Image (cartoon, rainbow, N blue to C red):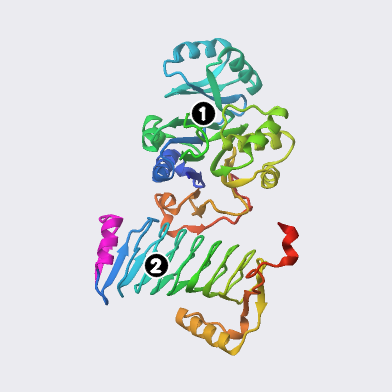
Amino acid sequence: MATIDLNKSTIRELNEKLQGGSSGDKFIVNNTVGKHALSVGLTKEVDVEINGHVGYYCAGMNQEASIKINGNAGPGLAENMMSGEVRVTGNASQYAAATAHGGLLVIEGDASSRCGISMKGVNIVVGGNIGHMSAFMAQSGSLVVCGDAGDALGDSIYETKIYVRGKVKSLGTDCVEKDMKKEHKEELAKLLDLAQMNYAVDEFKRYGSARKLYNFDIDQVDEY
Amino acid sequence: MCGIVGLFIKNPKLESQLGALVAPMLSEMTERGPDSAGMAVYRDPNEAGCKVTVLAQDSEFDWENFEKSVHTNFSVDKFYVNQNHAVLSLSSSLDKVQDWLHDNWKDLSVTSAGSNIEIFKGKGNPADFIEQFDIKNMTGTHALGHTRMATESAITTEHSHPFSTGQDLCLVHNGSLSNHNRLRETLKRAGVQFKTDNDSEVAAGYLSWRLSEGDDLDEALNHAIEDLDGFYTFAIGTKDGFAVMRDPIGCKPAIMAETDDWAAMSSEYRAIATLPGAENARIWEPEPTQIYSWKRN
């Protein structure tokens, strides 16, 4: 167990130390005071606990590592994550898990706008609400929202599965409500369990792509 | 990219430390805006008369001669020079003072007018600005600051924020407006005057115009959502507090925080983290198009 104090270490020193860790290593990071790009580019199965609020791009490009933030996260949390797990005990600002390919992001509080924008396989579980334009152009993976969703949810969505427990302010273009089949209930139950969120699967509705934007529609030729 | 900070003192005991509290916030936003910096400070009200801040472009400007002339023409409550700015607290009406400045002192531009507000701004690194203007020793009820990274117009003192938008009102802006050229022409025809080609000055001019048309601040900001095209987080300083509003898309960041002692806003949490008790503050992100305001009761 190594403790890194950001009053004494630079961000570069921190990231070099975390990136140089071996699988099974544990790190604690203190005195974050909203600094940017903390714990980015990790590729080993290390365990990082960050105490305090973090700024832009925390846990970016994460692979294998398990990162827990005891606080709020700024914009771009877990951007382009490939695998591993990132958990925030507070809220996350805009475009959390943007373009992320894999792994699990758990936001215990609220997520701001554009959560999961262009997500490509990551699973995201949000304990609270999410902001507008979330899952915009989402391509793969699942987004679970235990609270409400803002405007234009899933606009221009490809194949991501969105599960929302509360209200959806509005759906984006080509995003529609869909049936909860057995496989969806199983997947949702698994994600809620992994995220340690205690909600019944039956309280959720599923949203996804109507797949009407996949091909050019000759009837819309007048629009151009 | 730009940085915005705002600090509103709730506990009067902290008013003597306003500058000491807001200077580290501004400094923390240097990376968002290293080109120029500015600060609006609300303090020492002159309700009976008026208070005006003037800026001299010429570094050789003869402030002694100006001060003599002010004393000859007005009953002066307070006059002081801070770098290339001077603050005039006078017993006369604001119109009279502004007319006199306009007619006699073409080399000076007015950066703020009202009864409480003082606006200072300058080119260069925010740390130098804080040092030169002795921001850390400023007292007051609330302050609004800006660090600028110029993206659409020149780097000069006059292009720097805050922009005055009327009596005791000022605007700082993070973002960019896309319809400012057309809007500037429309506002000019309505009688609004502009000093620069800066987009944020158009937003300030727009709010001044709406307020002169009878809107209150909330109404003016709601009209701004309709008429301004582009990205913005605005912080507007008022005599009693300040207001914050983000555009409908909400791309530009903003974070707000409040304790029993103070209320603060900034582009990023790291600026707020410099304040005492920040770790236990109530923290939230303002929703797009919602107006958040603090007022002294």
**Residue occupying the point 37% across, 68% down:** A62
The residue segment tinted magenta is: A1-20
- Quadrant housing the C terminus of chain A: bottom right
Q: Position of residue A158 (x, y in %)?
A: 58, 71
**Total numbered labels:** 2
**Residue occupying the point 61% across, 24% down:** B49
Secondary structure state at the residue bearing disc 1: loop
Front residue (pair B295, A146): A146
Q: Which residue is mark 1?
A: B158
B63 up-or-down from A57: above or below: above
Q: Position of residue A70 (x, y in %)?
A: 40, 67
Q: Position of residue A168 (x, y in %)?
A: 65, 70
Secondary structure state at the residue bearing disc 2: strand
Front residue (pair A216, B247): A216
Which chain hosts label 2? A
Q: Position of residue B45 (x, y in %)?
A: 56, 31
Which of the 4 image quadrants contains residue B84? top left
Q: Amino acid at mark 1?
A: Glu
Residue B261 shown in magenta:
no
**Residue occupying the point 52% across, 82% down:** A198
Q: Which residue is mark 2?
A: A69
Tell me the crowding category of disc 1: few under 14, some 14 to 19, or many 20 or more residues within 10 angstroms, Cα based.
many
A199 up-or-down from B22: above or below: below
Front residue (pair B143, B36): B36
- Quadrant housing the N terminus of chain A: bottom left
Q: Amino acid at mark 2?
A: Ile
B48 up-or-down from B25: above or below: above
Q: Residue furthest bottom?
A: A182
